[in-house]
Amino acid sequence: MATQSGSKTSRLVRQFKSSKGELTPRVHEDVVTLVFSSPDVNGKSIEVPLSSFPEGIRNAAMAYGLNTTIGSAMGNLEDAELDDPDHVIGAISERIKSLQAGKWAGERSGGGRPSIIWMAFVDWRRSKGVKDDEAKLASLHTNWFEDETNFKKLQANPEFAVFLAGFKASRKKPDAQAANAELLA
């Protein structure tokens, strides 16, 4: 039996082609074709026009994608906000309005809170002595962090995983201290 190195997903590169023929690693409003390729197959790729799928499959895929991106709006909320149903419904409503207005990337284009993984990534880089200015961070976020392959590599990094767990725990420390005070009173 042949051994397999690396993860299966790192061998698959998923891209989205616009009506102008531009390839991007992120989905956007002008996607007309899905492109699948692998570094292991010498540049060969499979291009699948969205229009090639039957309407029922397109509707199911659209429902799945909308459900996912609308639910992701909750990822921008702090723990205390997640405990407030009005806050949760408000975040979801705002994401729906943004999509209905034709703004797919609204959840990533300023104004919202950065993801906890992004904040941990920036802190982790700083803990390694890397000094990034705002322009470098913006470039990293757009050109590296938002690329699915790189994002998965980051999440698979054992050292970063430990750092991320500590980062998340440190953000909950004030809540934990308050809960402890109540329990220990």
Image (tube, rainbow, N blue to C red):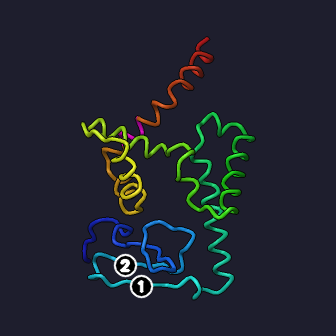
Image quarter where the N terminus lies is bottom left
Q: Main secondary structure of the magenta part?
A: helix
Type of amino acid at the residue the image marks with label 1: Ile
Measured Cα–Cα span from mark 2 to mark 1: 6 Å
Label 1 Cα neighbours within 10 Å, binned few <14 / some 14-19 / many ≥20: few
Relative to 63, is 174 on the left or the right? left
Where residue 106 appears, as percent x and y from the top left, is: 58, 55
37 or 11: nearer the eye? 37
Over which residues does the magenta segment extend? 162-166
User: Measured along the vertical axis of the image, is residue 40 above or below residue 158?
Assistant: below
At 27% from the left edge and 38% from the top edge, which residue is drawn?
131
Relative to 11, is 184 on the left or the right? right
Type of amino acid at the residue the image marks with label 2: Ser
Relative to 32, is 43 on the left or the right? left
Q: How many marks?
A: 2
- Dot 1 falls on a residue whose secondary structure is strand
Image quarter where the C terminus lies is top right
Magenta highlight on residue 38: no
Q: Which residue is mark 2?
A: 37
Q: Which mark is residue 183?
A: none
User: Measured along the vertical axis of the image, is residue 145 above or below residue 29?
Assistant: above
Image-quadrant location for residue 162: top left
At 36% from the left edge and 37% from the top edge, which residue is drawn?
123
Circle 2/circle 1 CB separation < 8 Å = yes
- Dot 2 falls on a residue whose secondary structure is strand
Q: Which residue is mark 1?
A: 46
82 or 30: nearer the eye? 30
Lower position in the chain sequence, tag 2 or tag 1: 2
Where residue 85 appears, as percent x and y from the top left, is: 73, 41
